[in-house]
Amino acid sequence: MYRHLARVFLLSLLIALPSLHAQRELLTPDQIEQVEKKWPGTKRTATGIRYIVLKEGAGESPKSGDRVNVLYIGSLLDGTEFDRTQDPSRPFTFRVDRGEVITGWDQIIKTMKVGEKRIVIIPSSLGYGSRGQAPKIPRDAVLVFEMELISQGSE
């Protein structure tokens, strides 16, 4: 009887695996093709964010509630820039997991270390979703950020 249950479990697991994979992929096939063409070798988080580490950082990653300082350039998948903060004396500052930034930023910043620089591709559902951010970010836009974590603290 246990052998039969084990077989049923394995069979159901094999059937479920493709759908589990599909749930994590939040980009359309066309968007995936664009990303892979422009940034080959991206890694993907469990939630569907893709990224490339351009420069390694050091130390511990930020945790919920930490204040972080970030430099970034934000653009759409087609390369159209919509925002930037590049002056180290005036970085973009926010508290992690406090609803101050898009979900994709809260998720990815917790995987970075101070000094780390990445290209980050955030699916629409972890960005501004179907509402967009008029006039610069259209509905359902995939967001691309070149971002650098320059400091963090719990202050």
Image: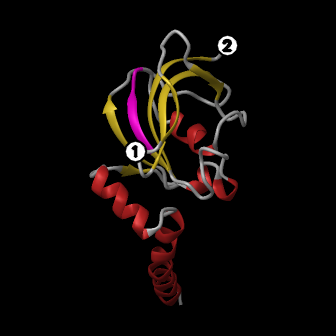
Relative to 122, does residue 83 appear above or below in the rendering? above
How would you classify the magenta stretch by its main secondary structure? strand
Q: Viewed as shown, does residue 77 lie left or right of 65?
A: left
Dot 1 and dot 2 residues touching (CB under 8 Å): no
What color scheme is it?
secondary structure
Question: Looking at the image, is mark 1 or mark 2 earlier in the sequence?
Answer: 1
Task: Please report the bounds of the magenta region as a residue range.
Answer: 115-120
Residue lying at 68% horizontally and 26% vertically, measured from the top left: 65
Q: Which element type, helix, strand or loop, lies under badge 1?
A: strand
Give yes or no for residue 86 being in the magenta stretch: no
The residue that disc 1 covers is: 51
What amino acid is labelled 1 in the image? Tyr
Front-lying residue, 40 or 86 = 86
- What percent of the width, then of the height, locates residue 80? 46, 44
Q: Residues within 10 Å of mark 2 (few under 14, many from 20)?
A: few
Which residue in the rendered view is the most extreme toward the top? 89
Residue lying at 65% horizontally and 45% vertically, measured from the top left: 135
Q: Which mark is residue 155?
A: 2
- What percent of the width, then of the height, locates residue 95? 66, 26
